[in-house]
Amino acid sequence: MRGQSCRGLLLPSAPELIMTSKSLLLIAALLLSQAVARLSARGVPTPMATGTAAPTGEINGISIFATAVTEEDRMTTPSARMWDEEPPVRAENIYTGPTQNLLEQLLEGYSMDLRPGIGGPPVDIDVGFAVQSIDQVSEINMEYTMTMMLSQSWIDPRLAFNSSSVSEIPLAGATAEKIWIPDTFILNDKKSFKHTVTAHNRLLRLSSDGKVLYNVRITTTAECKMRLKKFPLDTQTCTLELGSYGYANRDVAYHWRTDQEPVSGMTHVELAKYSIVRFDTLTGNVTRDTGIYSWICLKFKMNRDFVYFMIRTFLPCVLLVVLSWVSFWIHHEAVPARIALGITTVLTMQTLMSGVNASLPQNAEIKAIDVYLLGCYVFVFGALLEYALAHNLYRGTKAAALKAATAPPVPEGGGKHGKKKGKGSSCSENGAASGQSQAAAAAVLAKLSTGNSVDRHARWLFPVAFALLNVVYYVVYYYLPENDIASLFTQY
């Protein structure tokens, strides 16, 4: 056996233990030499002479050498080169560093609560619009909705700087919360909001002369006082008014920008029921209960698209009126047909009037469309009344004709003179009278069969009157000014 057993276990012999110990010592020596070489490569001083190799010990006749790494070898090591060389200067540090320091210096001690040049002349605010859309023009609420990009620029001497690397600094929109911004608001606004998708839609730029450009994208619903006397042949004028809420005109003065077009995009706006014919920019002052404030205004004029209402309202009304005239060619004895046609046209006209009035403000103002709808309603209702009149006349005339046809003949003379006549002459006269009565009754019945005189007159009277109504209507509401139209309904 190679070793002695102890309680059934085999133990290695002494020579095996010696060889194992030598192997472990050899491995430890190699690891030590590698550690020394790494320390030398990192610049850690060691007692080993540079570029020399000396024995560090001997284990069982095997000499262990630790070779020191020279300076030349150390510099060729990748890790050593990365350690000793200076980190490269990033490109962003060349610009961001000075600009960041410049911005910090400008904002140091800056007070956003005080306007630029406080105590001096007012701050001039140059304003411009970039209109993107105008929609939801409502006659009921008398308002419109506009989406635009509002630009404001002013000079703040506290933010002026002198730099050779940059002349303009584009800033994040959040920086606007650190500098003074004019408290501009829309005077005729009902509700507004700023766009925030995918980030807050606002822009801020700072020039070296202290000029600040602030741009924000907003959607506003503004009031528009509409005059609807000529609706739908009307023209509406709406405004968008801006000013400062807290700074009077001695502190802030608003102007339209002059370096470029003050309002852009208006000529490209497309509306559903309107077309913009012109727009103007106004500047002035407005007096409020807290003082006199600077004020600017965008004023635009819109013509209503009459074709839209012609197709949806006026043409159906005309067709209903013409349909009511069909009853003039239906025989009087067809009572269910004429009554059903008259009632149907009246109810349809009433429904059409209700639908039109539902889209208009409920006020006492008489509108042009109210006059036209009422005129059409009168013609439709008049056609129904015409049948009532014609039917009664028809029944009375027919009864009289039948009575005359069946009545006994009446002699020409009476009393003694009648009795003196001969029997033959009396019979001949009675026969002649009876024949004349029957011929007259037949003529009347034939005339009734071709139609009542009321219907014959209505067939041309109603169309002529309705055509005259249309001519007068369009002349009055299309050519007369609105004030003259209003006087037509108020002078009496």
Image (spheres, helix red, strand yellow):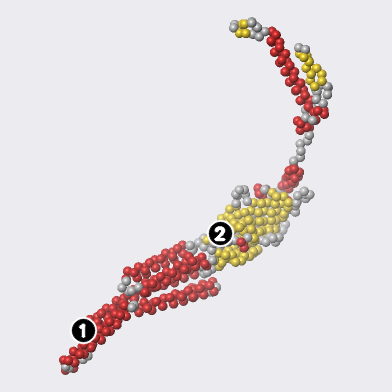
Image quarter of residue 316: bottom left
Q: Is residue 88 left or right of residue 340?
A: right
State the residue at coordinates (70%, 56%). 154
Contact? badges 2 and 1 (CB < 8 Å): no
Q: Residue 203 or 451: which is nearer the viewer? A: 451
In the rendering, which numbered label is found on residue 135? 2
Give the amino acid at mark 2.
Asp
Q: Position of residue 181 (x, y in %)?
A: 66, 52
Q: Position of residue 17 (x, y in %)?
A: 69, 10
Give the amino acid at mark 1.
Pro
Q: Position of residue 446 (x, y in %)?
A: 30, 80
Which tag is nearer the camera, tag 2 or tag 1?
Answer: 1
**Badge 1 element:** loop
What residue does disc 1 label? 408
**Badge 2 element:** strand
State the residue at coordinates (35%, 73%). 330
In the rendering, which numbered label is found on residue 90? none
Query: From this viewpoint, is residue 480 visible?
Result: yes
Q: Position of residue 468 (x, y in %)?
A: 46, 76
Q: Residue 367 or 391: which is nearer the viewer? A: 391
Q: Is residue 214 left or right of residue 45?
A: left
Q: Is residue 481 left or right of residue 167?
A: left
Structural crowding at the residue carrying mark 2, measured as other residues with C-alpha within 10 Å and reported as few (<14), some (14–19) or many (≥20): some
